[in-house]
Image: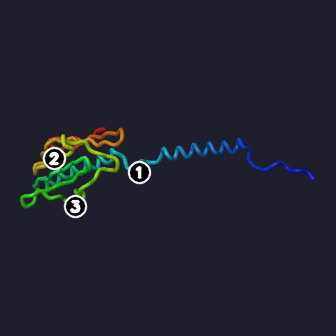
Amino acid sequence: MRRSAEHGFTLVELMIVMAIIGLLTGAVVLAMPDPRGDLRSDAERFAARAHAAQDKAVIEARAIALLVTSDGYGFERRERGAWTLLGEKPFEQRRWAKGATALVGDVGQARALFDPTGIVEPLDVTLVRDATRMTVHIAADGSVRVDG
């Protein structure tokens, strides 16, 4: 009885398959988005909320304050002689995304007051994560710009 040819794969064929799998795995890992989110997205959300606060101040004819710290930000409105935090969306308190921090003021916090005419004291907030920086500029006329 004749022995048939051996069945199976050679070592070279197995190594080629392993190399292809390794390359595909590397491509998938590099293509995956950062689970913390994009720093530009955080800056743009912050800028949009700041602009909405300006609109709210004008529409309601009441001053709105934007409080920014290294950990997050929130909005306040003057009621019965005291500043109270706003809790309604989109003005509830927010924390910066994981790993992000803000560089503001000399003491790590800043306040911008949108008056009923839409005027605000200029404010620059720089968001930092790893080596990435994004700056949100709030101009005196209330316009908001994101640079990075």
Q: Which mark is residue 35?
A: 1
Q: Which mark is residue 112?
A: 2
Residue 73 as seen in the image, left or right of residue 82: right
Hey, what amino acid is under mark 2? Ala
* Image coordinates for residue 36, horizontal then vertical, percent: 38, 50
Q: Residue furthest right?
A: 1
Residue at 28 percent of width and 39 percent of height: 147
Secondary structure under tag 3 reads loop
* Image coordinates for residue 89, horizontal then vertical, percent: 24, 59
Disc 1 crowd rating (10 Å Cα; few below 14, some 14-19, many 20+) is few
How many numbered callouts? 3
Disc 2 crowd rating (10 Å Cα; few below 14, some 14-19, many 20+) is some
Disc 3 crowd rating (10 Å Cα; few below 14, some 14-19, many 20+) is few
Compared with residue 105, is residue 87 higher up or lower down, i.e. above or below? below
> Label 3: which residue?
88
Secondary structure under tag 1 reads loop
C-alpha distance separating marks 3 and 1 = 27 Å
Q: State the residue in front, 105 or 43.
A: 105
* Image coordinates for residue 38, horizontal then vertical, percent: 36, 46
The quadrant where residue 22 appears: top right
Closer to the chain start, of discs 3 and 2, is 3
Residue at 84 percent of width and 48 percent of height: 5
